[in-house]
Image: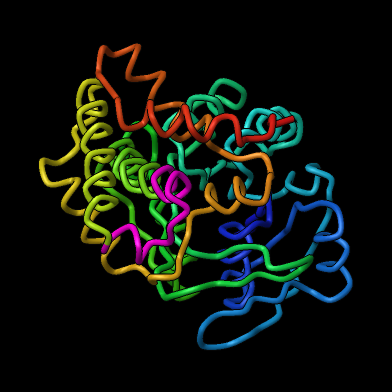
Amino acid sequence: MSIAIFGVGGAGGYFGARLIRAGHDVTFVARGEHLRVIREHGLTVLTDAEAFVVRPRVASDDPAVTEEANVVLLGVKCWQVEDAARALARVLGKRAVVVPLQNGVLTVDRLASHLGADRVMGGLCGTITRIDGPGRLRSVGTTHFLRFGELDRRVRARTRRLRQAFLDAGVSAEIPKDIHVAIWQKFLFVVPVGGVGAFADADIGTLRTAPELRSTLEAAMREIHVLGRARGIALPDDAVQQAMTFVDGLPASGTSSLQRDLAAGRPSELDDWTGAVVRLGRESGVPTPVHDRILAKLAPQGRPCT
């Protein structure tokens, strides 16, 4: 299976590196100094247990190198999805499928509007991995997983092949019964962790042990649970409890990409995370006071996404 990684950040780079180590045909689409170092020296991945270097078959800033790929893993930020979709629409092979890794509930519709629903899967991932310098990733902990599935909820041969490719690479990969529910469950976890973490300037260990922050985190999750149900997503009754249990098992020093981007003054996914909750809440008649407060504080800190 030929796989292209479009956006070699923390998630795309980590999972792409694991696929390369397993012997799969992998192409990277990256840019700038990150791309230059990958071309010259490979991609270095530092984990708690080891450091390793991988070299993709091709590394380029030209989306056209994805033309022969069977699968494109989209690892760009939410605010870059529209541009990526337009670029892929010009070059993507007729039988190829795009699997987004973003933490958002609007990405699939954006991709489908440019590529057609049959060329898009729903997808999500979990990993605490970040760019630690050009051509270099730093990964914390052992939580690394992917979940993906067809938008019509059928299980096709291409879905099974992709899952097997990741299993061969030693990566946990699942095909949920309903990928739309799975995406909202991840959204319910990551948006409160990112928003409350950035609001309080706190790592995960502090969020889960400080009583007031833990209470705020749970309240933010409950708002998304009610919102998802109002929008026809069959979120399980214990979705908030599941999310908090997951939080309790994460490395205490971890922080979200949203929090790191805001702290560094970089463009962030705030509008597609907390902002999306607020907008969808208004559309659906669901109050979101916790997210309203987070957005009001954090929005002035965010740089325009251009």
Give coordinates of residue 274: x percent, y percent.
43, 33
Rendered view: 266 above or below 140: above
| Residue occupying the point 82% across, 51% down | 31
The quadrant of the rendering that contains the N terminus is bottom right
68 vs 286, nearest the viewer:
286
Give coordinates of residue 103: x percent, y percent.
46, 43
Q: Is residue 237 shown left or right of residue 117?
A: left
Viewer can see residue 157: no
Q: How many marks?
A: 0
The answer to if 198 sits in the magenta stretch is yes
**Segment colored magenta:** 194-209
Rendered view: 186 above or below 162: above
The quadrant of the rendering that contains the C terminus is top right
113 vs 222, nearest the viewer:
222
Rendered view: 125 above or below 144: above
| Residue occupying the point 83% across, 54% down | 60
Give coordinates of residue 192: x percent, y percent.
36, 43
Viewer can see residue 15: yes
50 vs 204, nearest the viewer:
204
